[in-house]
Image (cartoon, helix red, strand yellow):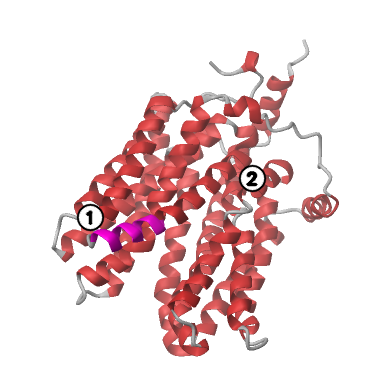
């Protein structure tokens, strides 16, 4: 009896999944890759003050350099997901990492090419954003194809914890390197380590033939195989898809607002406080929180709880409870309580890795990369707007409470939408074969 195309596609997908040893090896490798991604991303913010002194930048010029990363980052999300779905997410990640690692390591050289340091640095950050923009959509595509559904949440949250690791490493080690060897050393280290990671992946985890084939595809613009077209019309007719996109938008926007304004909040509200406390403690809390959320999610599913029930519970924690602690930040005058509330809010936001981020893989594993790219593009753009709106509210009201109210409002909207319309059934199959 001949299989229908959707059944054949599902059987082929199951055959292509990693074995447990392969999954463990790739999880550790991608955790390190995500860490290095953030090391390279955070290098410029860590070095901005020193570079501004060397090159005579004012706050506006430094802001141009810092924000230019997101100009590029917003543009390649969908492209990264599409390429990941077509040629394999691991190949997209490796090729982009080799390029952003080289650019990061070469940043000090670019800064001394001429007198127009602002132009060169802005250009390098746009390129870095373009190259890093493909990472998470390609990662989502890779994990949706290679990891069993019952293990996706823990795998994704483990790999996602690399973002906190990278932020901590660059903040701690980068500060020491700044004092000892100057800002150039931060770029040399983060870029050099990324290139070493690329060499390791190329040598031990990828075949040379597959990588050459992927390069040929990119050079010629030809498909590797007869890959099914993305069913855009079918996807966007589903309320569950829109709920996933809007929830991802809300989560990203809330995170960017807190990430951007929390250091300033602590400096202005508690001027005598130690910077390493409020810059480090929340991220130390976020690492085990992210790992725990993934373990809890997969454990609940293995115990027989419905997938969508678990995903919604994770979003209640990641968007609901986290926003409660954000609101508490605006109502206390105690430094210790503020650090606790900030740590709880940031830590709980990592539960989104086991909620909405994995839900996109539930809905459309055959095109999860490109769909995540759409959602993450919306989230990045909303984050830029949200950060600006937060600053406007702080300036006009003279109170930090308004900014934390904004975070809570955005999170609540995303949570309510997902609770009402979120589902975990596949929507990328032909209508007569959907898992009902």
Which residue is at the front of the view, 117 or 151?
A: 117
Which residue is at the front of the view, 83 or 296?
A: 83
Farthest left residue in view: 333
The label number, if any, that marks residue 401 in the structure image: 1
Sooner in the amino-acid sequence: mark 1 or mark 2: 2
Residue 340 visible from this viewpoint:
yes
Q: Secondary structure at mark 2?
A: helix
Q: Quadrant of residue 342?
A: bottom left
The residue that appears at 13% across and 63% down in the rendered structure is: 334
Position in image of residue 242 (x %, y %)? 50, 32
- The residue where tag 2 is placed is 81
Residue 260 sits above or below residue 248 on the image: below
Q: Main secondary structure of the magenta part?
A: helix
User: In the rendered view, does 122 fall on the left or right side of 229?
Assistant: left
Which residue is at the front of the view, 266 or 118?
A: 118
Quadrant where the N terminus is found in the figure: top right
Q: Which residues are magenta?
A: 387-397
Residue 100 sits above or below residue 410 on the image: below
Q: Quadrant of residue 121?
A: bottom right
Per the image, is 390 magenta?
yes
**Viewer-nearest of labels 1 and 2?**
1
Per the image, is 284 magenta?
no
User: In the rendered view, does 128 fall on the left or right side of 388?
Assistant: right
Q: Secondary structure at mark 1?
A: helix
């Amino acid at each position: 009896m001949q299989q229908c195309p959707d059944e054949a596609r599902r059987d082929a997908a199951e055959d292509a999944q990693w074995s447990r040893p392969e999954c463990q090896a790739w999880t550790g490798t991608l955790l390190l890759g995500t860490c290095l991604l953030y090391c390279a991303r955070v290098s410029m913010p860590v070095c901005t003050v020193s570079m501004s002194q060397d090159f005579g930048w004012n706050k506006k010029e430094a802001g141009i350099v810092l924000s230019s990363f997101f100009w590029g980052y917003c543009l390649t999300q969908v492209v990264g997901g599409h390429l990941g779905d077509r040629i394999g997410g691991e190949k997209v990640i490796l090729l982009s990492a080799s390029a952003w690692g080289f650019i990061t390591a070469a940043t000090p050289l670019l800064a001394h090419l001429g007198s127009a340091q602002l132009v060169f640095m802005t250009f390098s950050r746009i390129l870095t954003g373009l190259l890093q923009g493909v990472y998470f959509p390609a990662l989502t595509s890779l994990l949706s194809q290679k990891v069993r559904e019952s293990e996706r949440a823990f795998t994704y949250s483990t790999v996602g914890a690399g973002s906190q690791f990278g932020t901590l490493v660059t903040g701690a080690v980068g500060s020491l390197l700044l004092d000892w060897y100057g800002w150039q050393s931060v770029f040399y280290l983060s870029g050099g380590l990324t290139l070493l990671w690329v060499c390791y992946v190329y040598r031990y985890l990828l075949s040379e033939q597959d990588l050459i084939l992927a390069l040929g595809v990119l050079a010629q613009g030809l498909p590797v195989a007869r890959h099914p077209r993305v069913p855009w019309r079918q996807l966007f007719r589903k309320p569950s898809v829109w709920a996933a996109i809007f929830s991802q938008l809300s989560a990203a926007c809330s995170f960017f607002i807190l990430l951007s304004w929390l250091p300033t909040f602590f400096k202005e509200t508690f001027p005598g406080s130690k910077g390493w406390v409020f810059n480090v403690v929340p991220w130390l809390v976020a690492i085990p929180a992210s790992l725990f959320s993934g373990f809890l999610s997969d454990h609940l599913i293995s115990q027989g709880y419905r997938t969508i029930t678990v995903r919604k519970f994770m979003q209640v924690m990641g968007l609901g409870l986290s926003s409660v602690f954000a609101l508490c930040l605006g109502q206390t005058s105690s430094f210790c309580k503020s650090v606790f509330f900030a740590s709880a809010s940031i830590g709980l936001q990592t539960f989104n890795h086991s909620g909405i981020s994995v839900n996109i893989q539930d809905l459309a594993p055959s095109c999860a990369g490109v769909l995540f790219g759409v959602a993450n593009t919306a989230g990045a753009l909303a984050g830029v707007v949200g950060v600006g709106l937060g600053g406007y509210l702080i300036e006009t009201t003279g109170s930090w409470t308004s900014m934390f109210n904004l975070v809570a409002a955005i999170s609540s909207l995303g949570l309510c939408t997902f609770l009402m319309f979120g589902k975990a059934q596949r929507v990328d199959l032909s209508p007569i074969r959907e898992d009902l």
